Image (spheres, rainbow, N blue to C red):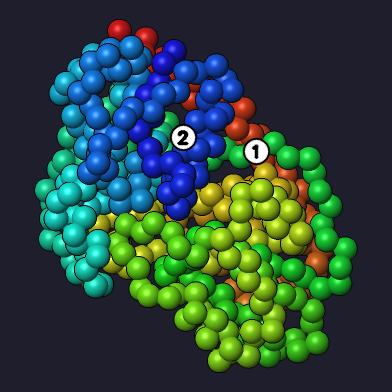
């Protein structure tokens, strides 16, 4: 089977590019011929090359992150090659693209460089047309995939499609040998992922300050690891890392922090496994809430499962579902006091980290890329057969 992949890929710095990189490798290992079409200078995909598309059995897109090229390519392919089976993994349900998927050279690209909140206001102004366009595409896709069950239910309802056409396939992760928790005294916490506003990092710092105030003698540290210059859908806010470092100094917790910015992929496993637990304090965007609910998951959480480490996460996205396996604990997003209580509980009872780690490792084993790739391969085979 030949599958054409439409997706951002490294060296682009975002979570979907990282996912697509692992996804492509896993599908190829499972015997699927995954090919990537040519892209144009404007960032769009070439959907006209007859020699390429006539040999393809199915096209699969990775949708999300506010990107439009993959969405537009799917629209074009449905018109130009109507017999071609089409599918997509929707990373940010309950919507497909969230903002007008105009070609990159259009207004959407210019708006990304505008100061906040102008890009968000533009997306809100055009939302009615964008939603109608998303529903038209969803109605024509042969299959859609979400990384959480919560996301699948939300997507089917919002796009007004038969729930049987939306499939849950969990985020894959590499197969790794088990690693014991660190034996050093004190609890070592890790924030891992791209570092940008909206991740609730300020809440995490506030929580650390509260724990230090109440447990001055307790030994615990936090490592801030991840990409410092991600590709963002709605632009940036200047030097965000410098802002965070200044906030840490003002809260009196700078000495508790270690910074490992732009961590190379080869160092991820050692970094995660050298800590007791990961902390993901994400917040759902209040501006995006006007457009829909984001009910996806996190690549960082997937790494925690692969490495056998538990997670303290907010109830943003679909984290409550992801941590329902006993692999961590959930707190109310934006509530630094609640987060401080979770951290304090771990500091007071470090054995919790071992319980979480065991459950995370079991989940990671079930979600190894080889298993996930076979689920996709089976779905693609059934989709192509149904299309024929």
Q: Residue at x 46, y 44 (%)?
A: 10
- Image quarter in which the N terminus is found: top left
Q: Is residue 257 above or below residue 137?
A: below
Q: Is residue 279 left or right of residue 357?
A: left
Q: Position of residue 360 (x, y in %)?
A: 69, 48
Q: Earlier in the sequence, mark 2 or mark 1?
A: 2
In the picture, the disc for residue 174 is 1
Q: Nearer the viewer, residue 234 or 202?
A: 234
In the picture, the disc for residue 242 is none
At label 1, counting other C-alpha atoms closer than 10 Å, the crowd grade (few under 14, some 14-19, many 20 or more) is: some
Q: Position of residue 71 (x, y in %)?
A: 26, 38
In the picture, the disc for residue 168 is 2
Q: Is residue 173 above or below residue 216?
A: above
Q: Position of residue 270 (x, y in %)?
A: 74, 53
Tell me, yes or no, if residue 106 can be seen here: yes
Does dot 2 land on a helix, a strand or a loop? Answer: strand
- Image quarter in which the C terminus is found: top left
**Residue 90, located in which quarter of the rendered image?**
top left
Q: Is residue 244 above or below residue 42?
A: below
Tell me, yes or no, if residue 375 can be seen here: no
Q: Position of residue 34 (x, y in %)?
A: 45, 23
Q: Residue at x 34, y 24 (%)?
A: 59
Does dot 1 land on a helix, a strand or a loop? Answer: loop
**Residue 80, located in which quarter of the rendered image?**
top left
Q: Is residue 134 left or right of residue 339?
A: left
Farthest-out residue, front: 41
């Amino acid at each position: 089977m030949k599958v054409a992949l439409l997706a951002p890929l490294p060296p682009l710095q975002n979570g979907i590019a990282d996912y697509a990189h692992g996804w492509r490798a896993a599908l190829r290992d499972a015997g699927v011929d995954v090919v990537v079409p040519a892209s144009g200078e404007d960032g769009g995909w070439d959907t006209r090359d007859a020699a390429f598309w006539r040999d393809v059995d199915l096209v699969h897109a990775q949708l999300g992150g506010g990107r439009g090229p993959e969405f537009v390519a799917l629209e074009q392919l449905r018109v130009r090659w109507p017999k071609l089976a089409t599918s997509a993994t929707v990373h940010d349900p309950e919507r497909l693209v969230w903002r007008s998927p105009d070609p990159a050279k259009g207004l959407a690209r210019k708006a990304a460089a505008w100061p906040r909140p102008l890009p968000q206001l533009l997306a809100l102004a055009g939302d009615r047309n964008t939603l109608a366009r998303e529903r038209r595409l969803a109605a024509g896709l042969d299959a859609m995939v979400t990384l959480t069950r919560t996301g699948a239910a939300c997507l089917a309802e919002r796009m007004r499609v038969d729930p049987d056409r939306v499939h849950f396939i969990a985020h894959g992760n590499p197969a790794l040998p088990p690693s014991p928790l660190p034996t050093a005294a004190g609890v070592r916490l890790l924030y891992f992922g791209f570092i940008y506003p909206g991740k609730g990092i300020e809440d995490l710092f506030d929580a650390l300050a509260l724990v230090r105030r109440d447990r001055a003698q307790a030994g615990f540290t936090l490592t801030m690891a991840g990409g410092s210059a991600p590709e963002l859908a709605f632009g940036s806010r200047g030097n965000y890392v410098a802002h965070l470092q200044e906030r840490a100094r003002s809260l009196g917790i700078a000495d508790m922090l270690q910074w490992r910015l732009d961590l190379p992929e080869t160092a991820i496993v050692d970094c995660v496994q050298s800590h007791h637990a990961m902390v993901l304090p994400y917040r759902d965007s209040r501006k995006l809430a006007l457009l829909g609910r984001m009910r996806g998951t996190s690549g960082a959480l997937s790494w925690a499962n692969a490495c056998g480490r538990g997670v303290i996460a907010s109830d943003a996205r679909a984290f409550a579902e992801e941590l329902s396996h006993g692999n961590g604990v959930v707190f109310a997003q934006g509530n630094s006091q609640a987060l401080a209580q979770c951290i304090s509980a771990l500091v007071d009872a470090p054995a919790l980290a071992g319980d979480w780690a065991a459950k995370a490792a079991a989940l990671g084993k079930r979600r190894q890329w080889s298993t996930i790739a076979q689920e996709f391969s089976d779905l693609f085979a059934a989709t192509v057969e149904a299309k024929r």
